[in-house]
């Protein structure tokens, strides 16, 4: 372990003692906001310090075993202890490095998921529907909540566009690498000659923005239009101007929402999506500048590039960023995304570790 990491871990150990002292104070509960803040900080630090304690204990165990080598009768036992200790030390050291990587402040946030049909006509809209079902099933497996914000169904049965809010702890941390171009290769139901068609959709995953802290929305820069919603909904949806369209004039970002029954709810939903899109645009611009000096394969968030291919005839899914191919397309389309998501997170952590070593 290098000196800078050891120094950081020592600082965290000292800070944990300070937090324990502060949280045990009889006056701490007088300020609940401060109590919650300190409790969250302690919850983040404690596992790292505990791991560091295990690392130091392993070092002591190795040292003890090395002293035992002087005894001929104990040498074989001591050598085995040293080998096991060094292996354990390596494992703990690697885990500590991961724990010390910079945390994405958005990781615990809810997300807005946007899926849009691209090239491929009706087959693309059907694939958009398949992708939405895949993410919805994944959310269900995580015990998250899915709310449809806006949808534009296609006549074929899929979606030209669908926007949903996924509410759950760690939603962004697990799905943030899904943004980009998704390509499907399969024989459409309408294809009579059995030819494989290629279609595409784009996916955008954006953390929910805190409108007060993250994005300042100036009313003078917003154009808000109301109109009658279209589609299913009975008499109510056709008789009231409940649908809302908000245009952010400086960026020309447009958000429409008509799925709610009230204009007030649709406006609130549209404002939330707008704040997330503006914040996402700012993040994209910042990452583009950073990428000029160091290109991050996964973390760049490039929406234009193709990131994944779903080949149904061969039963495989390939993520092109990390050259990972899995022959379990049915399970993945049914929401079993854990292996894919974990591989992408691991690759991103490897990139961060490489950057730290430079």
Image (spheres, rainbow, N blue to C red):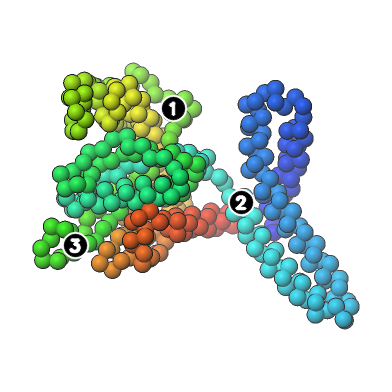
Q: CA distance from mark 2 to mark 1?
A: 30 Å
Q: Is residue 180 above or below residue 347?
A: above
Residue bearing the label numbered 3: 187
Residue 241, located in which quarter of the rendered image? top left
> Is residue 320 depicted above or below 134 in this figure?
below
Circle 3 sits in a helix, a strand or a loop, which is it? Answer: loop
Q: Nearer the viewer, residue 187 or 181?
A: 187
Q: Nearer the viewer, mark 3 or mark 1?
A: 3
Residue, x 66% and y 59% (percent of image)? 93
Count of labels shown? Answer: 3
Give percent across and percent down for residue 80: 75, 75
Give above or below for 334 relative to 169. below
- Seen at 64% across and 38% down, the residue is 41
Question: Is residue 34 found left or right of 341 in the rendered image?
Answer: right
| Residue underneath mark 2 | 99
The answer to whether one can see residue 174 in this image is yes
Callout 2–callout 1 Cβ contact below 8 Å: no
Q: Comparing marks 2 and 3, which lies closer to the viewer?
A: 3
248 or 123: nearer the viewer = 123
Neighbour class for label 3 at 10 Å: few (<14), some, many (≥20)? some
Q: Position of residue 196 (x, y in %)?
A: 18, 64
Q: Which mark is residue 211?
A: 1
Question: Where does the image place residue 340, in percent across and percent down from the top left?
Answer: 42, 58
- For the C terminus, the quadrant is bottom right
Could you tell me residue 76's position as x and y percent?
80, 80
The kind of secondary structure element at disc 1 is: loop
Quarter of the figure with residue 239: top left
Asked if the residue under mark 1 is in contact with the one under mark 3, i.e. CB atoms within 8 Å, the reply is: no
Label 2 or label 3, whichever comes before in sequence order: 2
Residue in view at x 48 percent, y 56 percent: 342
Mark 2 or mark 1, earlier in chain: 2
Ranked by sequence position, the earlier of labels 3 and 1 is 3
């Amino acid at each position: 372990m290098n000196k800078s990491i050891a120094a950081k871990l020592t600082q965290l150990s000292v800070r944990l003692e300070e937090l324990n002292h502060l949280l045990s104070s009889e006056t701490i509960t007088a300020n609940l906001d401060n109590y919650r803040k300190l409790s969250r900080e302690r919850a983040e630090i404690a596992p790292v310090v505990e791991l560091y304690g295990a690392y130091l204990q392993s070092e002591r165990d190795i040292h003890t075993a090395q002293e035992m080598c002087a005894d001929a009768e104990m040498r074989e036992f001591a050598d085995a202890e040293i080998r096991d200790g060094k292996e354990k030390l390596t494992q703990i050291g690697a885990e500590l490095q991961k724990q010390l990587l910079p945390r994405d402040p958005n990781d615990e946030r809810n997300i807005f998921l946007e899926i849009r049909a691209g090239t491929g006509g009706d087959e693309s809209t059907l694939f958009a529907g398949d992708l939405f079902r895949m993410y919805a099933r994944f959310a269900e497996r995580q015990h998250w909540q899915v709310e449809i914000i806006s949808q534009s169904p296609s006549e074929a049965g899929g979606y030209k566009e669908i926007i949903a809010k996924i509410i759950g702890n760690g939603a962004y941390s697990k799905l943030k690498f899904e943004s980009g171009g998704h390509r499907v290769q399969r024989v459409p139901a309408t294809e009579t000659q059995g030819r494989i068609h290629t279609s595409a959709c784009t996916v955008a995953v954006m953390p929910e923005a805190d409108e007060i802290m993250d994005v300042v929305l100036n009313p003078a820069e917003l154009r808000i239009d109301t109109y009658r919603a279209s589609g299913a909904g009975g008499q109510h949806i056709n008789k009231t101007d409940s649908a809302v369209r908000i245009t952010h004039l400086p960026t020309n970002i447009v958000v429409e929402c008509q799925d709610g029954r009230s204009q007030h709810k649709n406006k609130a939903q549209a404002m939330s999506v707008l704040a997330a899109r503006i914040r996402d645009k700012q993040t994209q611009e910042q990452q583009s500048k950073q990428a000029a000096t160091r290109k991050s394969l996964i973390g760049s968030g490039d929406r234009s590039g193709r990131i994944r291919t779903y080949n149904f005839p061969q039963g495989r899914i390939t993520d092109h960023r990390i050259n990972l191919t899995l022959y379990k397309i049915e399970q993945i389309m049914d929401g079993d995304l854990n292996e894919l998501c974990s591989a992408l997170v691991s690759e991103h952590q490897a990139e961060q570790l490489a950057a730290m070593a430079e």
